Image: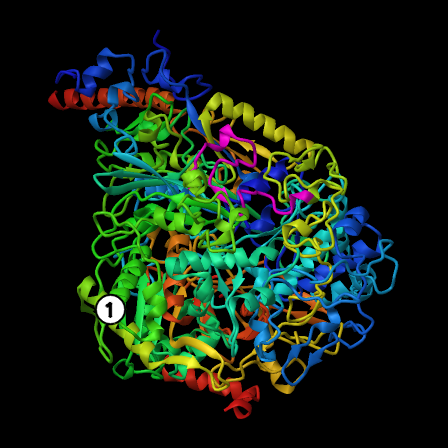
Amino acid sequence: MAEAHPVGFQWVMEAKRRGATVIHVDPRFTRTSAVADLHVPIRAGTDIAFLGGLIHHVLETGAYFEEYVRAYTNGPMLLREDFADTEDLDGLFSGFDPETGSYDTETWQYAGMTATSSAGDRDLDVHEAERGQMPGSGGAPIATDPDRDDTMQDPRCVLQVLRRHYARYTPEKVHEICGIPVETFRRVADALVENSGRERTSAFAYAVGWTHHTVGVQYIRAASVLQALLGNIGRPGGGILALRGHASIQGSTDIPTLFDLLPGYIPMPHAHRDQDLATFIEANGGTKGFWGDLDAYVVSLLKAWFGDAATPENDFCFDHLPRLTGDHSSFRTVMDQAEGKVPGYFVIGENPAVGTANARMQRHGLAQLEWLVVRDLNMIETATFWKNGPEIATGEMRTEDIGTEIFFLPAAAHTEKDGTFTNTQRLLQWHHKAAEPPGDCRSDLWFYYELGRRLKARVAGSDDPRDRPLQDLTWDYPVDGTGEPSADAVLREINGVDGEGKALPGYTALKADGSTSSGCWIYCGVYADEVNQSARRRPGAEQDLLAPEWGWAWPMNRRVLYNRASADPDGRPWSERKKLTWWDGERWAGPDVPDFPVDVPPDYVPPRDARAAKAIGGAEPFVMQSDGRAWLHAPAGLADGPMPTHYEPEESPVGNALYGQRANPARQRFERADNPYHPEPGTPGAAVYPYVFTTFRVTEHHTAGGMSRWTPHLNELQPEMFLEVSPELAAERGLTHGGWAHVVTARSAIEGRVLVTERAKPLRHGDRVIHQIGVPWHWGPNGLSTGDAANELLGVSLDPNVHIMETKAATCDIRPGRRPRGPELVTYLADRRRQAGLEEEQR
Amino acid sequence: MNPVNSLSGPLADPAADAGYAAGHPPRVGFFTDTSVCIGCKACEVACKEWNALPADGVGDHGAAGDVLGLTGMSYDNTGGLGASTYRHVAFVEQRVPARDSAPVDLGMPSTDLPGAVQPGADREDATEVRWLMSSDVCKHCAHAACLDVCPTGSLIRTEHGTVLVQEDICNGCGYCIPACPYGVIDQRQGDGRAFKCTMCQDRLGAGLAPACATACPTESIRFGPLDELRERADARLAELHDRGVGEARLYGRDPDDGVGGDGAFFLLLDEPEVYGLPPDPVVTTRDLPSMWRHAAGAALAVAGAVAAAFLGGRR
Amino acid sequence: MRTWIEGWPVYRQLTGPDKLGRGTASRSDRTESLRARTQDADRVTQSICPFCAVGCGQRVFTRGGRVVQVEGDPDSPISRGRLCPKGSSTLSLVTAPERVTTVRYRRPHGTEWEDLDLDTALDMIVDRVLTTRRRTWQETDDEGRHLRRTTGIASLGGATLDNEENYLMKKLYTALGAVQIENQARI
């Protein structure tokens, strides 16, 4: 966090000054470790074993917050008799189909009912293979209260199932798998337990070190389970904090440019012979909780997009939405590009030629396009692969042979346009335009507005039905003298308006009858009272710690989600010290906006026929779940298991010490010549790639360097690609500090200067020493400081829930000296693959 | 009242010593608390951006290939203070004996230091890694030798008690460079003139804090009136000592030291040498008055001898 | 205004309190006239740092329509005026001499960049979108399921896009029938 979010880290340092204990768990000793109370080095890719060990500790010592668990989690819920755990099936849950590599999740559900997640997983008509593409936004059973045992002693209740699931995650096992000494593990466990409960809370902060794995979603789930057990959710100082890496990466999922989502986490519709809006709503909404109003959200979105053309008679133009038939995510698309199936590509402020795993595959995709539009501040590698990409040097591509037509359009900087970023805590902050962009530079808002305007003009007279959505699309935004559309007007459309055209106050005002519009239901309220709430800037010094009048947080300017859980079931704060939201006899009170129907008392029991928000009981804080509870066991919504389970990464030097099943059985793999994986541990070829590497960022650069490799003052601070190794590994491989070395995988080899550092420490795994190499990923061929890109090394294997790739743990070799150049590199890599037994296998 | 000019010893008000009338602004400075430094180098960048300093070693912008190089000194790639680097973050990596006690405030070993363990010792148990970071800067000494030796009047004491190079006056003679006991000031290649931290003199005039202190995410760099900073530093030191961080110490805070106390002083977690700081800096012009007396005596003697020679020659 | 004789440092040294010429007597005209360039800005605009997701407040100082300084916004309860090295480099980021400010065009099989008028570039892109869309249109799949889409046009956006930009992108692409719309948020 000190490395990649230094200014956010000021709050950690301040907490530490006030007595907080800061523990840093990371394969590498970083600038965060340097100021932490304790650094816990961990073998890359084994965090679920570590977190599972903590869950084990909490359950076996009885350290969980029992009243919280009983009332607010699904710990008491009973599971079906036919549910089988990984303990029963040696690393698999019941329902796994080895043919498709996917789970039928029915047996994971509560006893006596059919349970599926809201917002996504209930679309039963969808082909089995396409299920994985359906996001689950949480959610819960459709039916009424499931069977439960509030004593939490029944062997089939979730808490007991959880206890059995983690029974073997002992400190000794954690030591064996993660390389963490038992004593260190105990210190972490003690600190966590001592700082949780009624009077104290603990927080987890994570970044892509947890998400870039084939089991990334389950990493986060493991932290969720632990925090729910400890009562650290919905309370001040608690939570699981995602430290996102880009100015508006949160916004980019809220208002997604993602294939599987519509704004506000509404799933994109899947293909059916015939599906009307009502069926879609029924399949994807829930009956209880705020997803129960999905119809209002979807209809309001369609009204925002298609305006007067969207009527009840035509299902509000629901059929204008294109349909999905499976995985259309970035990696799948790039493979299709490489096969010549995708002629056109827009790359907007992104740099896949060096910034995405298996960069070579990315460039092969680019080279097979007919046309490519790149918009950026700088002349990034994605725009120049045809001129100076690594394949030009190796002779695998020739500039003259590449048929891709490329438009490089210079972009405006954030100082040159109005708009909102959504930061990592869901806070929308408006940035005001300070200067005109130079030359041809334009905002992306201008580009898409102009593109849409011209496209609409071109199809205006068309009678082709496929042009109807474009013709019906609302696209009237005021423009200023330079032709720039008003971002303010767009934000107001996102907020939405009522039948009289007045800005809506919040999403509870949305209607399913077509009388309201809203471009993104969770952002509804950002333009309440006709004021751009995101532009509010009352100084922090004039406000309390929550600073509610600075920017606007979705939803409803709420700063702590599920804050109803900061009070006990009767509505009293769990403790004075940690009070945030409480029942004052008439309403929910406190400094934050209550995350609960404000006048529903703690003792409210909904009638059996209640639905949506009205079906939430007064003591059910998790209002987005239709059982109102935090899930220790996820009866639906996940593709790879209801409880987090330790699996080894796609590539690791050792087998799974807990189960026969080595890696996530549901992970997404691509067996292709351009995406070779290393041999499994224990097979003869595995020794060719004996070490672990993990990618990382440094403070002085940003992601793949698109915004930092052109700035002299940053580049002098980290001027060259380097490789972090321990003195022991340096001795083993003959690497010299400051000299060159290259890292080799089956995909590629990259070079860098060797940084031999005591900070890198070999870990033990049984009688084996595991060496881990740190590979920063900021470099590429362009800019002021240049170097090989870490993404050359990585293959593509994905988390099955979200299609995120594994970059944080893979295997490799490291050798002294620079890598071979030109065509010799190709030969060199092929030789290594042959040694590993991969070439015959896959070519 | 005109205070007595002095070149060493305690000096309550360096600005007054340089002729600023009563009512001049209070002496300001930096207190750099390295125990909360995260080594992010925001200070280096903010300084260079504000002062429009060139990047060291960056030649033609946009030139193909590397124009910069890794120093191999941990994450420090600017190497030290210089004519284009007014703030510099040092990174010290050491293997030290492992803590055997419960966590202490700083993640630092509780044994006395320096106690770096030699490479090759067993790493499984008895040792751990320590990574110290510290942002160095011109000390703005109460007795600044650079200023005292400057023959052109380019180096002056400002109304804020800081030491400033006036770049419109500097003729690049370089006398100031060996005079600095900390090795701070330097000549810029291709320019010839001497440069160093100005404590953002232009910002001070506008009532703003220097760029580095403004940016510093963790308040490792604090700016303010020196008196207040000293109080704050004393309190912080006591706090750390209370928490068992016995190795914490202040550096440059003492007005009785060899430079009359630094305008920029530090809280360190080890001996100053570990950070590349001189342990006991002395203003290099401390002995200037006595040297002048000796020199004057010698000059008189020489003059007498020469005169005698001439006189003798005329005989 | 000092007279010529008062501007002479030696005179000031001899007549003033700074007998050793180490302060008031030696101050140059430049030193006397030093001003923070933020003082001379025409406008201060509140902005947000474009790098990571902490969302630090920035103040952008402009003069004559040009950005002359970017620093932390002390009003921000998120960042309290502080910036990291990347945030502190924002001035260089937005004023970099390397920044490309004209449209560059590479024709198929071309070996060099060419110039292209922005308006023409837009029209050419419109042509390609419509042509590709027509050619790759999928009305139904082979089971007769409705698709009404193209898989011939893909998009990958960075996560420094504004919400408003993402919104127009998703809205326009969806109306076009394009589905392979992705973002850094996944990768």
Residue sitting at x 34%, y 33%: B198
- Secondary structure beneath dot 1 equals helix
- In this image, A240 relative to A840: left or right? right
Magenta span: predominant SS is loop
- In this image, A12 relative to C67: left or right? right
> Identity of the amino acid at label 1?
Arg
Q: Mark 1 — residue? A: A458
Q: Which of the pair C115/B161 is nearer the observer?
A: C115
Residue sitting at x 63%, y 67%: A45
Q: Is residue A217 visible?
A: yes
Q: Which of the pair A537/B168 is nearer the observer?
A: A537
Establish if A236 lies above or below A622.
Answer: above
Q: Is residue B1 magenta?
A: no
Instruction: Tell me the magenta residue range.
Output: A535-564
Establish if A544 lies above or below A638.
Answer: above
Q: Is residue A739 visible?
A: no
